[in-house]
Image (tube, helix red, strand yellow):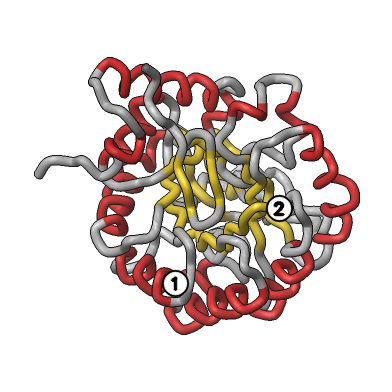
Amino acid sequence: MKPDLSVEIGSLKMRNPVTVASGTFGYGPEYAGLIDINRLGAMTVKGISPEPVSGNPTPRIVEVPCGMINAIGLQNPGMEAFCKDYLPFFNDFDTPVIVNIWGRSVDDYAKVARRLTDEDLVSAFEINVSCPNIKEGSKAFGTRMDSFRRVIEVVRKVTGKPIIPKLAPQVPAIAEYALAAQECGADGVSLINTIPAMAVDLQTRRPVLGNVVGGLSGPAIHPVALKQVWEAASAIEIPIIAMGGISTAKDALEFLLVGATAVAVGTENFANPEASMQIVDGIESYLIENGIGSVAEFSGSLRI
């Protein structure tokens, strides 16, 4: 008998605990010819703001040992173009859609959530308060408790759909932010976002990235993410979508073991577009081999 892979985050029902990290999978069509999107537990799309954003100057990505640094700058078409040009793509699938939203002000977050909440194809919102490569990201919202709480409270007022704040890793105590999200009405939290980083060119003696700094992702940050997910899970009762350096089913299972409900595959999508499918299969195989009946039974079963 196959194990039960389904998980829930508020009213968001996922057939399995695997989604993709925002910004690493485009808006869906980019990967549709490479994997079966209907096999994902959910599809998390690239960040959406009220108005179109052109992003940071190039170069925007640099490969580094055990990962990469990106400074895309949350380039996106804006909420109206997203609804018109991208969202209809999901009419052909039954995978729930999580929309990552962000803004330059608290009102911007409310504006996007209000506009998209009546779209039937939108199942949940991931609230990006922690992007490290724009001024309005973690510096303004994700690492200041007052503004962090305010963003969640405002979005909560304008939508009944699940809201999932994405937490910044560079805070003194991530459990405190996870608990604040729960107190403000969040249905879950996602963590971690990328870690602020930079790369330099010895030949030109200049920064590699056009934005100078960006966000480090990939296997290098996995141990950091694992610790922070464990700390957050120890403090809250709402679900966690864990991310940070997931390349294999083993990485995903480690997050589930320390208390995550679901996982998001990010940087590995660029190197191996089939990674999310392989991870779904790997999680199922592990549960079968160990006689575990469901993901829920395994989640948080770390022995200390």
**Can you say whether 211 is above or below 218 in the image?**
below
Q: From the viewer's perspective, is 187 left or right of 23? A: left
Amino acid type, label 1: Thr
Q: Which residue lies under the disc numbered 1?
A: 143
* Viewer-proximal residue among 95 and 140: 95
Q: Please give left or right for residue 151 compared with residue 66 in the image.
A: right
Image marks 1 and 2: residues in contact by CB distance under 8 Å: no
Residue at x 29% of width, y 47% of height: 259
Place of residue 140 in the rendered image (x, y in percent of width and height, measured from the top left): 55, 75
- Which residue sits at x=77%, y=53%? 76
Q: Residue at x 39, y 19 (%)?
A: 2
The one nearer the camera, 198 or 30, is: 30
Q: Position of residue 231 (x, y in %)?
A: 26, 57
Dot label at residue 122? 2
- Quarter occupied by residue 161: bottom right
Q: Is residue 94 above or below residue 282?
A: below
Q: Is residue 123 visible?
A: yes
Of the 4 image quadrants, the one containing the C terminus is: top left
Q: Is 30 drawn above or below residue 299 in the view shown?
A: above
Q: Nearer the viewer, residue 178 or 157?
A: 157
Q: Quadrant of residue 106?
A: bottom right
Residue 291 as seen in the image, left or right of residue 98: left
Residue 39 locus on image (x, y percent) = 60, 27
Question: Is 137 placed left or right of 295 in the picture?
Answer: right
Q: CA distance from mark 1 to mark 2?
A: 28 Å
Q: Quadrant of residue 162?
A: bottom right
Question: Looking at the picture, which amino acid does disc 2 mark?
Answer: Val
Mark 2: which secondary structure?
Answer: strand
- Mark positioned earlier in the residue sequence (1 or 2): 2
